[in-house]
Amino acid sequence: MELYSGYINKLIEQFEKLPGVGSKSAQRLALHVINMPLEHVERFAEIMVEARKNIHYCKECCTLTDNEICPVCANQSRDHSTIMVVENIKDLAAYEKTNKYNGVYHVLHGAISPMLGIGPNDIRLKELIKRLEGNIQEVIIATNSSLEGETTAMYISKLIKPAGVKVTRIASGVPVGGDLECIDEMTLLRALEGRVEL
Ligand code: ZN
């Protein structure tokens, strides 16, 4: 015998597809949605669809944006000759929150991981190399200090050094395996200021 109606089961199945949501949480969320006022559910679904349709990669730095060019890349008062390479948007947000970095970014959307089968072509590296054709003074590699982050940093440095661009790596004040987004602003700034040339 089915415990729930078909629609509840379908809803539970959808929630279970989300990262970090087990079957118990999926049941709880599904039942919560059933009890929400209809207009709230409609608005929620609408925003999800609209967000998915309208958000895309910034043409320059690959961060997610509603516009063709994200606000950081569109800001002419920022130093467009310094690119900080980060693994994801959360890392970009962490550095933006410090209000101390005036360059631009490049978001890789991942890191190289031979173990997980993620290679250089699976992250936004080609787009970074393309940007080096412009007037770039320095590329700061701010990938995480995990194995994947270090592998990615090494790979990028080998790839772009022949182009004659200065390549630096943020200092290892960032704890090993630490996600950039969880680290406080002071540590981030120290890591940035103490960056070393590769
Ligand atoms: Zn951008």
Image (cartoon, rainbow, N blue to C red):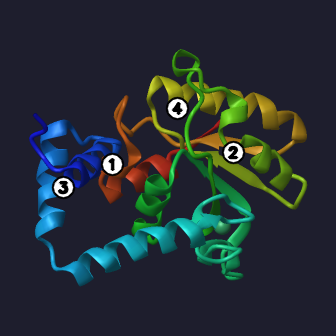
Distance (Cα) linking label 1 and label 4: 31 Å
Q: How crowded is mark 2: few (under 14 residues within 10 Å), some or many (20 or more)?
A: some
In the orientation shown, which residue stands out farthest toward the top?
115
Secondary element at tag 4: helix
Residue 175 placement (x, y as % from top left): 34, 34
Residue 3 percent coordinates (x, y): 9, 41
Disc 3 vs disc 4: Cβ atoms closer than 8 Å?
no
The relative height of residue 121 versus residue 147 in the rendered view (above or below) is below
Q: Can residue 144 be seen in this view?
A: yes
Q: Residue type at mark 2? A: Arg
Label 2 vs 3, first from the N-terminus: 3
The residues bearing labels 2 and 3 have C-alpha atoms spaced at a distance of 35 Å
Residue lying at 81% horizontally and 57% vertically, measured from the top left: 136
Callouts 2 and 4 close, C-beta under 8 Å: no
Residue 193 falls left or right of residue 41? right
- Circle 2 or circle 4, nearest the eye: 2
Residue 77 drawn above or below residue 18: below
Task: Quickly name the residue at label 2.
Answer: 124
Q: Mark 3 points at which residue?
A: 30
Q: Mark 1 points at which residue?
A: 14
Identify which residue, 103 or 91, lies in the foreground: 91
User: Disc 1 or 4, which lies upstream in sequence?
Assistant: 1
Mark 2–mark 4 distance (CA, rounded to whole Å): 14 Å
Q: What element carries label 3?
A: helix
What residue sits right under mark 4 in the picture? 149
Res. 21 image quadrant: top left
Q: Where is residue 186 in the image (x, y as percent from the top left)?
A: 33, 56
Q: Which amino acid, mark 1?
A: Gln
Looking at marks 2 and 4 on the same chain, the residue that comes earlier in the sequence is marked by 2
